[in-house]
Amino acid sequence: MVLALSLSAYDPAPNEKRNLKLEIVELKDVSTSTLYIELLDASGVVFDTRSIALAPHATRQTFSVREVEQEEIAIRLFQDLDGDGELDKNAFGMPTEPFGFSNDPVIRFGPPSTKEILIDLRAKTFAKIRMQ
Ligand SMILES: [Ca+2]
C-alpha cells in the first residue's frame, strides 16, 4: 500500500487535457447563418455540440476546442442556412446545406466512417476543415 501511494506521485498527468485550434474555410457567403460543430469520440459518439452565429458574409471562421480529455476526436460541421438547427437533405439523403468533416474526406455515397475523420490530439494542435 505504501508503495502504491508513492508510485502514484509519478503518474504522468493522467487527466491531461488537450486543445485543438480549428480553421474552417469555404463557408457559404450568406447574410445570416449558424455554424454547428459536433465533436465525436473515437467510437463515433457525439460528446459535445457547439453553435456559432456567423458574421454576415463570413467565409472562414476559427474555433478552439479546449480541454478535451479524449486523445482522438472527430469533428462534424454544417452551416445552417435556414435557421432550423438541422442539416437539410434532399430526397436522396444528400445534404443541401454546406457541411464539413475533419481530415476533409472525399464524400461519395454517404458520410465517412469515424475512423476516416479522427484527429490525434497527441500529435496535432491545429486542423483546417473545408466546407463541402
Ligand atoms: Ca437547416
Image (cartoon, rainbow, N blue to C red):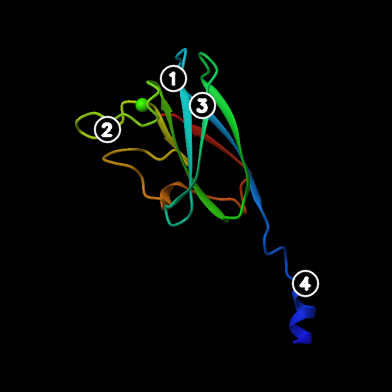
Is the C-beta of the residue carrying label 4 under 8 Å from the nearest atom of ligand 1? no
Q: Nearer the viewer, residue 54 or 114?
A: 54
Q: Secondary structure at mark 3?
A: strand
Nearer-N-terminus badge (4/2): 4
**Tag 1 residue:** 28
Identity, as a three-letter code, of the amino acid under mark 2? Met
**Tag 3 residue:** 25
Marks 3 and 1, how far apart in space?
Answer: 9 Å
Most distant residue in the front direction: 84
**Tag 4 residue:** 10
Image x and y of residue 1, in percent: 74, 87
Image x and y of residue 117, in percent: 45, 46
The residue positioned 40% from the left and 21% from the top of the image is 81
Most distant residue in the left direction: 91
Quadrant assignment, res 30 = top left
Identity, as a three-letter code, of the amino acid under mark 1? Lys
The residue positioned 40% from the left and 40% from the top of the image is 105
Q: Is residue 64 above or below residue 57?
A: below
Nearer-N-terminus badge (1/4): 4
Number of numbered discs on residues: 4
**CB atoms of marks 1 and 4 within 8 Å:** no
Marks 4 and 2, how far apart in space?
Answer: 51 Å
Dividing the image into four quarters, tell me where ligand 1 lies.
top left
Is the C-beta of the residue carrying label 1 under 8 Å from the nearest atom of ligand 1? no
How many C-alpha atoms fall within 10 Å of the one at disc 4: few (<14), some, or many (≥20)? few
**CB atoms of marks 3 and 4 within 8 Å:** no
Q: Is residue 120 above or below residue 95?
A: below
Q: Secondary structure at mark 1?
A: loop
**Tag 2 residue:** 94
Q: Secondary structure at mark 4?
A: loop
| Residue 41 numbered mark, or none | none
Marks 3 and 4, how far apart in space?
Answer: 42 Å
